[in-house]
């Protein structure tokens, strides 16, 4: 009886196994380098996009500050103009009040004095001039 002789396999230095692993490493190395390059390109594009967005953000911030300054100047001018109008209105109101509420002459005359009549006509003419003046704003 002859015993079946085992099929010869790769003996100790394992040359065939070494060849297969070297073959696999030869393909894995370039694939890993290509993947790394693709990742680096993607990261570079993302960094460029972040830089672009940061620049746009800075520009928008500067524009916003400029708009805020313009708005503040406009409000300041408007308030100054309205304050002047209020001072004029106050003076006009005092004149009208003085003219309307003038105390009649002591002699009992029902006609207002000449001074009161002049004040009243001046106040009425100022009111009419204020109404006729174009509104600025």
Image (cartoon, grey):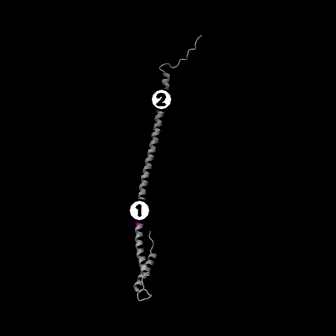
Give the residue displayed 41% in from the left and 67% down from the top: 79
Give the residue displayed 46% in from the left and 44% down from the top: 46
Quarter of the image where the N terminus is located: top right
Give the residue displayed 47% in from the left and 29% down from the top: 25
Residue 15 within the magenta-colored segment of the rendering: no
Q: Which image quarter: residue 68?
A: bottom left
Disc 2 is placed on an element classified as helix
Give the residue displayed 40% in from the left and 65% down from the top: 76
Quick one: 40 or 123, which is closer to the camera? 123
Q: Main secondary structure of the magenta part?
A: helix
Residue 55 lies, with reference to residue 130, above or below; the image says above
Q: Disc 1 and disc 2: Cα gap in Å?
A: 69 Å
Instruction: Determine which residue is flagged by label 2.
Output: 25
Residue 75 within the magenta-colored segment of the rendering: yes
Numbered label attached to residue 72: 1
Disc 1 is placed on an element classified as helix
Residue 36 lies, with reference to residue 77, above or below; the image says above
Which sits earlier in the primary sequence, circle 1 or circle 2? 2
Residue 134 lies, with reference to residue 36, above or below; the image says below
Q: Residue furthest top?
A: 1
- Residue 24 x %, y %: 49, 28
- Residue 96 x %, y %: 43, 79
Q: Which residues are magenta?
A: 70-77
Q: Residue furthest right?
A: 1
Q: Which image quarter: residue 82?
A: bottom left
Residue 80 lies, with reference to residue 52, above or below; the image says below
- Residue 107 x %, y %: 41, 89
């Amino acid at each position: 009886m002859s015993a079946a002789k085992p099929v010869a396999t790769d003996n100790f230095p394992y040359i065939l196994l070494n060849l297969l692993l070297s073959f696999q490493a030869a393909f894995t190395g370039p694939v890993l380098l290509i993947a790394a390059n693709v990742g680096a390109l993607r990261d570079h594009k993302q960094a460029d996009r972040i830089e672009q967005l940061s620049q746009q953000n800075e520009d928008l911030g500067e524009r916003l500050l400029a708009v805020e300054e313009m708005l503040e100047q406009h409000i300041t001018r408007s308030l100054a103009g309205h304050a002047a109008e209020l001072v004029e209105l106050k003076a006009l109101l005092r004149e009208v009040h003085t003219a309307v509420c003038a105390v009649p002459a002591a002699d009992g005359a029902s006609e207002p004095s000449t001074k009161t009549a002049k004040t009243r006509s001046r106040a009425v003419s100022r009111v009419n001039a204020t109404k006729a003046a174009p509104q600025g704003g």
